[in-house]
Image (spheres, rainbow, N blue to C red):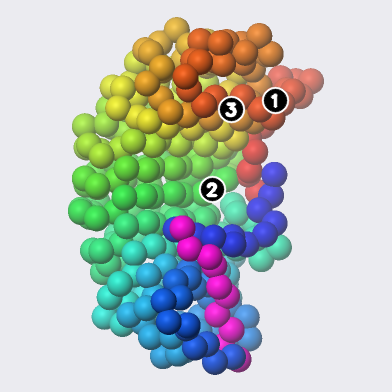
Amino acid sequence: MTIGSNLTTFAGLPVKRFDVRQRHRPRHGEAVAWRISHGEHELSDALDRLLDTVGGHTVTALLIGSWSDAYDSGPPLHLLVAARDRLPNLRALFVGEMTYEECEISWINQTDYAPLLGAFPGLEVLHIRGADGLRLSPVRHRRLKELCVESGGLPVGFIRGLCDSSFPALADLELWLGVQEYGADATVEDLAPIFNGAELPALRRLALRNAEIADDIATALAGAPVVARLTSLDLSMGALSDAGAEALLLGQPLTHLHSLDLSHHFMSPDVAARFEEELPGVRVDVSNEQEAEEDGFRYVSVTE
């Protein structure tokens, strides 16, 4: 699977592309997520014109698309940090919302997000696409409720920074772990603080998607304390096989979940059917069954 189209909604709002060549006059009460990207104008120019035209105080959700050198350097987060006083109501941000035609997901350069989080203490939703050079210096943020990182290979340094940070309001954590070939070097031991859940008291949805180590993750989750208070568990897009699935089935009860997403998997039909049979009150997704290659190789959904 590749990411071939831009989002049409984000943070519950319709996405509207900001065109610097047009004058945008927001209708009274209009609520949109604005999208800016590198095109005929640099991002700095696009951001300035957006804030001047629609009024920075009206911007609650913002998507940053491509920047001119995404293959070589991280996003210009310093522009947002410098504009923080002009964005007093920013609550949702997506950095790197670009298609594979603009830049393959595993080639998107990123950076340290601690300064951004420090500059926007009211931010509630943060989505990041791409993980080459992605870092998170330890930070405390009281308001962030939703964090999603989409990648073909998530570096262990980011995961350790996340685990060393404090996000007391974080209810939704989604990580696309990816494959070792594209920089995924974390083990289940590195994810242990997330599985324990002690530092994530508000967590209700845990999505560890697109994972080469899906079997190891499922096995660890079978006895992980955090599972007991989740309402949604998502291990989709990964290389889950019967080994990890059976460990999950034999582990702690999952009947309290509202949803369990295991789509894009390598389970046998019999094992996949057991989830639906044993969890009748849970919305279970075991669609998109895959077949391992002749050498036994199991592939994740998104890498390059």
Q: CA distance from mark 1 to mark 2?
A: 22 Å
Farthest right residue in view: 294
Q: Is residue 61 left or right of residue 198?
A: right
Disc number lying in front (3 or 1): 3
The amino acid type of the residue labelled 3 equals Asp
Earlier sequence position, callout 2 versus callout 3: 2
Give the residue type that dot 2 points to. Answer: Ser
Name the N-terminal-most of marks 1 and 2.
Answer: 2
Q: The residue tagged with tag 3: helix, strand or loop?
A: strand
Q: Are marks 2 and 3 in contact (CB under 8 Å)?
A: no
Few, some or many residues within 10 Å of mark 1 (<14, 14–19, 20+): some
**Pointer 2 residue:** 151
Report the label total.
Answer: 3
Q: Residue at x 26, y 69 (%)?
A: 119
Give, as a three-letter code, the residue at label 1: Glu
- Marks 2/3: CA distance? 22 Å
Mark 2 Cα within 10 Å, few/some/many (few <14, many 20+)?
many
Residue plotted at (51% across, 42% down): 176
Residue for point 79% across, 20% down: 294
Q: Is residue 234 above or below residue 114?
A: above
Name the residue nearer the viewer: 159 or 144. 144
Highlighted range, magenta:
12-21
Where does the N terminus fall, quadrant-wise? top right
* Residue carrying label 1: 289
